[in-house]
Image (cartoon, rainbow, N blue to C red):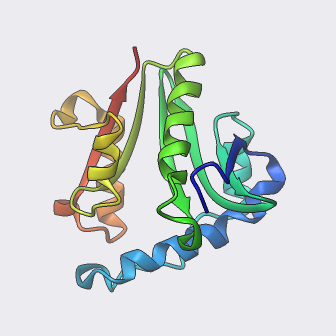
Amino acid sequence: MSKRDWSLRLARPEDADLMPAIESAAAVLFAEDPDLTELDLSDGWKPDELRRLIRKGHCLVAHVGDEMAGFLASEPFSRELHIWEMDVDPRFQGQGIGAGLLRACQIDARNAGFRAITLTTFRDLPWNAPFYAKLGFEEVTALDAHPRLASELALEADNGLPAERRCAMIHFLD
């Protein structure tokens, strides 16, 4: 498969039924990390939660032919668009789909008048913070200036994610 064999579009409510299976398939990568073996990888997004985000108008899906290959779920918070989840089915990884979803999100956010895109992620996993950094995101080091992100990181730690490995990232839009 070449990098041109897939397409992107805005997510539709019916897409929410397919997204959890992609999230579960992509989560297998986390199970390979010995420090994350205790994570409950089955506790993912529910279709109704995803439909709520899709109705806000900034979620994206990628398709290879008629098959959904990946998605990006985001939500507006004032002048920032927050990415809650981005996953690519392992069968389609390495084809530029994740980067395509993120670039399309950046274009959409800029066109919609957002000033930044935010997310939380693992600082050290190559397909997490280093991947986002290549696409213009930077780690938020002054969390006191970003209380929403600080609160999200604290909630993640309360839910069992290792706080020392997690970070918030931001991409400012011009």
Q: Is residue 78 above or below residue 94?
A: above
Q: Is residue 146 left or right of residue 41?
A: left
Name the residue at 54% across, 79% down: 42
Residue 150 visible in the snapshot: no
Q: Horizontal and vertical percent for residue 22?
A: 62, 68
Residue 70 visible in the snapshot: yes
Q: Horizontal and vertical percent for residue 51?
A: 74, 50
Q: Quick one: 172 or 166, which is closer to the camera?
A: 172
Which quadrant is the C terminus positioned in?
top left
Q: Is residue 118 left or right of residue 125?
A: right
Q: Quick one: 100 or 85, which is closer to the camera?
A: 100
Name the residue at 25% across, 85% down: 34
Q: Is residue 159 above or below residue 137?
A: below
Quadrant housing residue 163:
bottom left
Q: How many marks?
A: 0
Q: Residue furthest front?
A: 2
Which quadrant is the N terminus positioned in?
bottom right
Q: Horizontal and vertical percent for residue 16?
A: 74, 57
Name the residue at 59% across, 27% down: 108
Q: Is residue 3 above or below residue 127?
A: above
Q: Quick one: 136 or 149, which is closer to the camera?
A: 136
Q: Is residue 95 left or right of residue 71?
A: left
Q: Horizontal and vertical percent for residue 20?
A: 65, 68
